[in-house]
Amino acid sequence: MSRTKTLTFIALMAALSTILSLPPLVIPVTIGTFPSEIHFTQIPILLSGILAGPWAGLVTGAIGGLYMSWSVEIPFIVGGLALLGLAAGFFAKKLKLRPLFAGILAWCVQAPYVFVTDYTWFVLTRPMPPPVALTTVSTILVKLTVEALIASVLTAIVIPYIKRPGIFTSEQKTNET
């Protein structure tokens, strides 16, 4: 894939990731006393990493996570989503895993990061005692695991339709210099 196509794809996926984190495309839920949302912002991040590679996934996740990070006031979301895209790309491109497995394993890489950063954030910035923070973060991790599984399945379903037009085939010749 040419550099121009890759950059365009990253920009499109980062924008889509942001859009999928906005109401009305999210489902509001309350986790204990913590307001949260079910969203599908991971799908474009996984697509970018799996189809365009680890660095594309990293950039897509970082840019795609900016709005969500700002809106929920947890700055570590950017890093977590960047890590998700990087890991998905690594598992798909370097280890040649199928998209479903690449997405699930990418979440397994991201989950410890989410646990440590969210727990630390709640204990240090919110008046939350450590046991309450642990319960809140554990519940958030369950929600994020469900989201990651759904996103991985949907990504695996969508990829053949994206590949069909030839956007991501190495056989395609370009006249770009």
Image: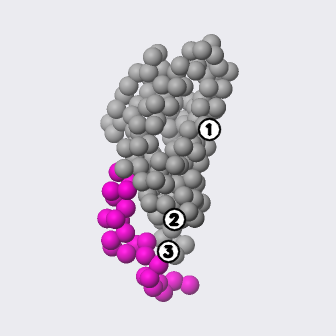
In terms of secondary structure, where does tag 2 sit? loop
How many other residues sit within 10 Å of disc 3, few (<14), some (14-19) or many (≥20)?
some
Where does residue 94 sit, x and y in percent of width and height?
A: 57, 64
Alpha carbon distance from label 2 to label 3: 18 Å
As drawn, the label of residue 99 is none
In terms of secondary structure, where does tag 1 sit? helix
Q: Residue at x 34, y 32 (%)?
A: 27
- Front one among 9 and 54: 54
What's the amino acid at mark 1?
A: Tyr
In terms of secondary structure, where does tag 3 sit? loop
Where does residue 117 sit, x and y in percent of width and height?
A: 63, 32
Where does the magenta region start and end? 154-177
As drawn, the label of residue 96 is 2
Labels 2, 3: front one = 2
Q: Residue at x 43, y 72 (%)?
A: 168
As drawn, the label of residue 113 is 1
Q: Please name the residue that numbered disc 3 is placed on.
A: 1
Tell which circle, 1 or 3, labels the residue nearer the N-terminal end.
3
Where does residue 68 sit, x and y in percent of width and height?
A: 50, 38
Does the residue at mark 1 contact the one at mark 3 (Cβ under 8 Å)? no
| 70 horizontally vs 153: left or right | right
Is any part of residue 51 visible from this angle? yes
How many other residues sit within 10 Å of disc 1, few (<14), some (14-19) or many (≥20)?
some
Alpha carbon distance from label 1 to label 3: 31 Å
What's the amino acid at mark 2?
A: Lys
Alpha carbon distance from label 1 to label 2: 24 Å
Tell which circle, 1 or 2, labels the residue nearer the N-terminal end.
2
